[in-house]
Amino acid sequence: MVKFFIIIGLLLFLGSGCTDQVEERFNNTATTIYFNLSGAQADSIVYSFAKVVENSHVIEVPVEIAGYPADYDRHFRVAVDETLSTAKVGLHYDALEESYVLPKGTFTTKVPVTVYSTDKLLDSVAVSIALQIVVNDEFPNGFSKRQQALIKVSNMLEKPEMWDLIYGRKYFGTWSKTKYKLILQVCEIEELPAYNGPNRYLLKGYGMKMQNYFKENYPVYDENGQVIESDWTIIF
C-alpha cells in the first residue's frame, strides 16, 4: 500500500513538472509580438495622397501576438529606424508615442502613424518610414521575423507591390497610373483589397467593371498618350 502511494506521488510530481515546462514554453511564445502585414501589403504599406483631398492621414499599422492574451493591459514599443528612413519627423509624419497598449484579452492592436502631404517633394518622390519593434520587459520577444514594417508616402499614384504578381496579371492587365486612378474612382475604393480567397470574387468583379468602362468610354488615354485597351484576360 505504501509503495502504491509512493508511485502515485511520483507520477503527480512528474506530471506537474511536465505541465510547468509546457506552460513555460507557451508563455515564452505568448510574448512574441510582430507586425501583421499580409496580402497586398507584404512587408510595407504604400499610401498616396493623390487619391484623396486631405493633406493628412492616419495609417494604422496592425500588430499581433502569438499565444494567449493576458488579463491585463500590456505595453510594447515601436521606434523609427532613422538609418532606413527617408521621411522627416515633423514634416512628413508625427513622432511616435513612447509606447503603445495591447489591451487585456486581445491578440491584436494597431499603431497609428499620422503622415502629411504638404512637402512638395512628395509630388515626385516617395519617402519611407521604417518601423521597428523594440524589445521591452513585457515583450522580450526573441522572434526575428516581422519585426520591421515600412511605410511609403507620396503625392504620386504608387504601383501596388503586388500588381505585377497578382493584380495586373489576373484582373487588370498592363499597369498605368491613369488606369489605376480610374480603377479607384470607378470602383469607389481607396486602394485595392488584399489578395485572398474571399477577395478574389471582389477583384474579379472590379476587373470586369473596368473592362466594361474602357469599352463604353473608348478611347481612354493614359498618361503617355496611349489608348487603354479593354482586351486583357481575367483569370479567376
Image (cartoon, rainbow, N blue to C red):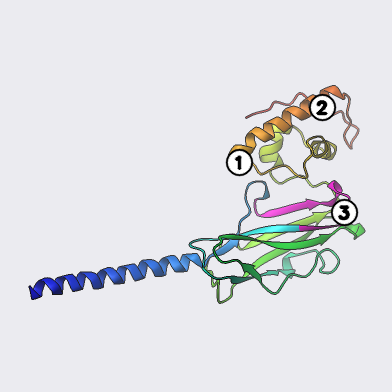
Q: Is residue 60 left or right of residue 55?
A: left
Residue 55 is situated, as x and y percent measured from the top left of the image, at 88, 56
136, 145: nearer the viewer = 136
Residue for badge 2: 213
Whole-percent x and y of residue 132? 66, 66
* Residue visible at 85% across and 55% down in the picture: 125
Q: What whole-number distance in Å separates the C-alpha atoms at marks 2 and 1?
A: 25 Å
Label 2 amino acid? Answer: Tyr
Left or right of 16: which side holds 73?
right
Mark-to-mark CA distance, 3 and 1: 30 Å
| C-beta proximity under 8 Å, tags 2 and 1 | no
Q: Residue furthest left?
A: 1
In the image, residue 45 lies in the stretch drawn in magenta:
yes
Mark 2 vs mark 3: give the one in front. Answer: 3
Q: Residues within 10 Å of mark 1 (few under 14, many from 20)?
A: few
Work out whether residue 10 or residue 36 is closer to the camera in this orientation and state it.
Answer: 10
Residue 170 seen in render: no
Q: Residue at x 60, y 66 (%)?
A: 103
Q: Which structural element holds mark 1? A: loop
- Give the quarter of the image for residue 99: bottom right
Which residue carries the number 1 mark? 196
- Mark seen at residue 54: 3
Q: Residue at x 56, y 66 (%)?
A: 104
